[in-house]
Image (cartoon, grey):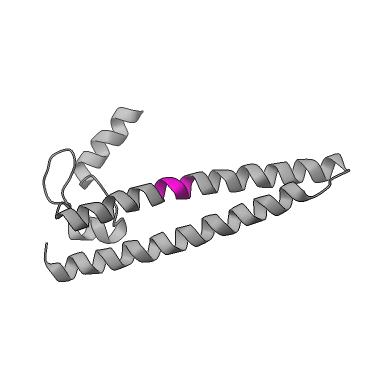
Amino acid sequence: MQQSELNYFKEILESRKRQITKNILGVNEELDQLNALELNDEGDYASVTNNSMVESAIVSQQEQELREINVTLGKIANGDYGICEMCEDQISFQRLKVKPHAIYCIDCREIVEKSRK
């Protein structure tokens, strides 16, 4: 992969990393505010609890993506970026454009997904 392509993906990944970090901080602040509310009504309590659960699930998903991005940025630094972890072939440029932190090529991703079912 050419240096210009690596720089392109690095920039995309770092931008997404900043966005996720900002989202997580915002959600955590919102959850803190919700937890600080004194709720006397069971309906309000149920609503806040439901919102907290949804937002916690979103944060969990974004934290996972953030871990994947950090690993990918390390691969860029080490010169291992864009190589499938299963077959060790190059991951296509188009696949990386869709998911810059992909660790599998399309064929291996399908194998992994089928084996999880």
Which residue is pictured at 83% across the width and 47% down the height?
38
Which residue is pictured at 63% across the width and 56% down the height?
29
Number of numbered discs on residues: 0
114 shown above or below 35: above
Image quarter (top left, top right, bottom left or bottom right) of the N terminus: bottom left
3 shown above or below 63: below
* Horizontal relation, residue 5 to residue 47: left or right: left
Visible residue check, residue 96: yes
As rendered, which of 102 and 31 lies closer to the eye?
Answer: 31
Image quarter (top left, top right, bottom left or bottom right) of the C terminus: top left
Rendered location of residue 7, percent (x, y): 22, 68
Q: Which of the 4 quarters of the picture holds residue 8?
A: bottom left
Q: Which residues are magenta?
A: 61-65
* Horizontal relation, residue 24 to residue 69: left or right: right
Q: As drawn, which residue projects farthest toward the right? A: 40
Which residue is pictured at 76% across the width and 49% down the height?
36
Q: Is residue 102 magenta?
A: no
As rendered, which of 96 and 107 lies closer to the eye?
Answer: 96
* Horizontal relation, residue 104 to residue 27: left or right: left
* Horizontal relation, residue 15 to residue 32: left or right: left
Rendered location of residue 74, percent (x, y): 25, 53
Visible residue check, residue 81: no
Rendered location of residue 21, percent (x, y): 47, 58
Q: Main secondary structure of the magenta part?
A: helix
Rendered location of residue 88, percent (x, y): 12, 43
Which residue is pictured at 24% across the width and 35% down the height?
111
Q: As drawn, which residue projects farthest toward the bottom? A: 4
